[in-house]
Image: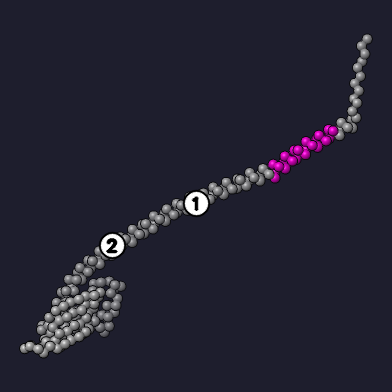
Amino acid sequence: MSAALIRVNLLDWRAAARETKRKRFLTQLVVAALATVLVVGILPVLYYNHRIASQQTRNQYLQDQIHAADIELKEIRSLKKTREDLVNRMNVIAELQRSRSAIVHYFDQLVATVPNGLYLTGLKQKGNTTTLDGVAESNARVSEYMTNLDNSPWFTNPRLVVIKRDDRGPSRRAEFTLEVDSANPNAPATDDAATASGRTAKAS
């Protein structure tokens, strides 16, 4: 006849229940701590890292656009400089062409205005003013020459600087120096506005 074995639990069931609750509480506490670390520590870091990466991407895009704009601006400045150089060269060429014909008219009128009994001995030009030295038979010839210059469209504002009578020798003569401003009637009005206004005043 076999004897029946009887198990006897020596632990208090209340102590076991408390141990179970304690372990469950510790587990929940660990889970809450991990969740807190995840929410407070890791998620903000990930969020701000994402924001920083996005901002850096935008900043890089803006820098690329600024760099491209700087390159285009340099090209525009280079094109403007090239255009200005071409315009200046064209203006120089046009001015040389006008000056070439103006010089021909200048000397032609300078000779055409000389009256009989007067000849020139020297000519000096500085800027827009020409200084003429010459010898005339009389003061009347000098006055006539100044009138001819004033009536010429290529000269304006003749003014006598000095005149000296020379009575030595068999013939009397007058040595003179006068100044006259040159004018170009074919020049644009903006380039010769002062001359044009002088012409208007003189015509009136």
Residue 76 shown left or right of residue 39 in the figure: left
* Rendering coords of residue 18 (x, y %): 86, 34
Residue found 66% across the figure and 43% down from its top: 43
- Is residue 139 covered in magenta? no
For the question of whether residue 93 can be seen, the reply is: yes
Nearer to us in this view, 136 or 66: 136
Residue kind at label 1, given as amino acid type: Gln
Q: Quadrant of the N terminus?
A: top right
Examine the residues drawn in magenta and state their main secondary structure. helix
> Do the numbered discs 2 and 1 sit on residues whose CB atoms are within 8 Å?
no
* Rendering coords of residue 60 (x, y %): 51, 49
Residue 88 shown left or right of residue 153 in the figure: right
Identify the residue position indicated by label 2 in the image. 89
Q: Residue 83, which numbered label?
A: none
Residue found 20% across the figure and 68% down from its top: 100
Residue found 76% across the figure and 38% down from its top: 30
The span shown in magenta is 19-40
For the question of whether residue 183 can be seen, the reply is: no
* Disc nearer the start of the sequence (2/1): 1
Q: Is residue 132 above or below residue 89?
A: below
Determine crowd level at label 1: few under 14, some 14-19, many 20+ residues with C-alpha closer than 10 A.
Answer: few
Residue kind at label 2, given as amino acid type: Arg
Q: CA–CA distance between discs 2 and 1?
A: 39 Å
Identify the residue position indicated by label 1 in the image. 63
Numbered disc 2: secondary structure: helix
